[in-house]
Amino acid sequence: MSTKHSKAAEKFLKNKAQAQWHNETLWMVREKRDKISKEVPEWEQLRHKSQDIKRYTNSHLAELLVQFEENATKNGAIVHWAKDDEEYREIVYKILKNHKVERFIKSKSMLSEECGLNPFLIEKGIDVVESDLGERILQFMDLPPSHIVLPAIHIKREQVGEVFEEKLGTEKGNSDPTYLTHAARKSLRDNFLHAQAAMTGCNFAVASTGDVVVCTNEGNADMGTSCPTLNIAALGLEKIVPNLESLGVFTRLLARSATGQPITTYTSHYRNPRQGGEYHIIIVDNGRSELLADADHVDLLNCLRCGACMNTCPVYRRSGGYSYTYFIPGPIGVNLSMAKDPRKYSDNVSACSLCLSCSQVCPSRIDLGEQIYKWRQKLDSVGKASKEKKVISGGLKFVIERPKLFNFALKCAPIVNVTPRFMKYNGLNDWGKGRELPEFAKESFNTMWKKNKIQGEVKR
Amino acid sequence: MKIGLFIPCYVNAIYPNVGVASYKLLTSLGLDVDYPLDQTCCGQPMANAGFEGEALKVAERFDQQFAKYDYVVGPSASCVSFVKENHPHILEKEGHECHSAKKIYDICDFIHDVVKPKSLPAKFPHKVSIHNSCHGVRELGLSTASELNMPYKNKLRDLLELVGDIEIVEPKHIDECCGFGGMFAIEEEAVSTQMGIDKVKDHMSTGATYITGPDSSCLMHMQGVIKRDKFPIQIIHIVEILASGL
């Protein structure tokens, strides 16, 4: 019994030291989040507020989006609508082509990952440079992010040293973080100065003002947008927030949940085009609006992309981002992948013990774990249920619906206790690979009760 | 007050002594306890694996079996929360109302919140580490989930504090999953086993000689790890401690 996730996870865990490091490092982020969230007395109220605002937004999405468009247009921005990834890529390309852009700098954006922007533009001959340090490292290594906030968390500094040596000409064998960061900064400064256009993602789009709000720590998004007069921002349509008051709720939750900081180092509001320049905002649907009609899963649109559910997830921490078959891993990724295409991404729903920690840690109170339970119920109807699990469930059902058979099975079960090890512990027994099997009792509770053994012991 | 004792399948088959201890403990508190005969399973294993529909008949039978009792009480937080959280919508699909969900309690929850004993005759001269199991914490509220910014309360600790000579500790990752998760334990064998090992080690780092908790399923999983790796710690269901000496 296995899935693509479980097989990849098994491989990930083979490198014990690296796996343990991954687990402990992300747990430290969770602990930082715990500590700082407990310094805010109204934390739980904020989470409720966030959920309320998101639900309001989801149910008033059309009008808020139009309001945003109107205000952004008044501010001088040019607003585009993309129904899917293809339209999004084409819009970006068209803008760049019209301005004959060859050198393009972009900050971190999971939407661009979702829509495959970089490979598309690179194929068209545009030099795309990622300005987020983690993303830049991964771009050099030709790897996707393994975490939505800490994209290169799985890469050790020695690996960074090696790739910088090759790409940036740093000293051989030098993996000192400060040295490497300086080298990256120096090379990026050149990109900042010479880029002809810059692009950012968007954490929040404020309907009442038309602001695009970008939250970062390195400031490289801001550096990237400082020189070029052609700027682009792209957002998934769920990034809309009604007004600046509601934005305050989210900025208080976001960085605390994501990294345990009170707020990101930079919270930049982009409103107007640069003097003599253009500011394009692309609003992308790409399947999001379909969730609005799905009562079980509409709350997925509440997601702030803080990554707290990944840091807390005991499975994510022990299997790494690449063990999932979707570009977003962890509890939110399992859910979003199933919302995207349950047939294609069904291998991710095994990655959950239903501990429900993700649901409690989520700053927008998305019932992530409960939703994974619901996706599992849908697997059979899309032809993706595990055959073995189906057989086991059918067998269990048959036995537990028949108390006599159940009792008979329990009577026979102790035979397993004395069965030779080679018959119990072999390739067919997944439980027994790393654990001993439980031993069946000589007499079940049902039998003891019938023999009056239990009642008899109690003095009334 | 008539109480129907709910004994989940693996307690029935593997840990019947947990059932015996539950019965003894409840009757010692002066309660009228009965065991509806021939119980099997609540249906959680199939439902968590994605086959909730397979649990329909057992959910129906469960509701009938416990119809005449004022309370349903069982020594398993996870099974209890499955009945409470999922039996209603499973039965609703067939147009049945679920009565059990409103009156079912995990035994610790029940003793703590309904019976409220001031003392227990139990003695347990050992250092025990509490296993705050996921569904007990995050569905039944037996303790405050570590993710929440709320004053920490722990009903299991409150009850254990009534036991003589006991030393109570909790692991560093206070309510992290042990990795059982039903069929998750076999489908995601590698991750599940690693979670089990990490959890047992966390309990051991407290210096405890026993891991105790309200769920035999989690304890069973950790016992599998302990036996394989010959870790110097044992498992015991919390009810067995509370009923010690009875």
Image (cartoon, coloured by chain):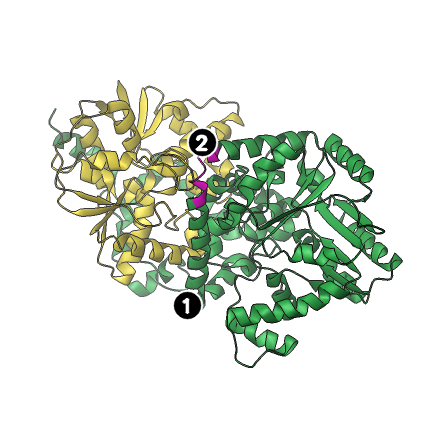
Q: Residue A342 versus residue A102: which sits nearer the camera?
A: A102
Q: Which chain is green?
A: A
- Which residue is under mark 1? A17
Q: Looking at numbered disc 1 in the image, what kind of residue is underneath it?
A: Ala
Chain for disc number 1: A
Which is closer to the viewer, label 2 or label 1? 1
Highlighted magenta segment, given as a residue range: A36-44
Under tag 1, what secondary structure? helix
Q: Is residue A313 visible?
A: no
Q: Colour of chain B?
A: yellow
Does the magenta portion include A42?
yes
**Residue A211 at x, y = what percent?**
72, 41
Q: In the rendered image, which quarter is residue B125 located in? A: top left
Q: Reply above or below: A207 against B221.
A: above
Q: Nearer the viewer, residue A16 or A47?
A: A47
Amino acid under disc 2: Glu
In the picture as drawn, the residue positioned furthest to the front comes out as A275
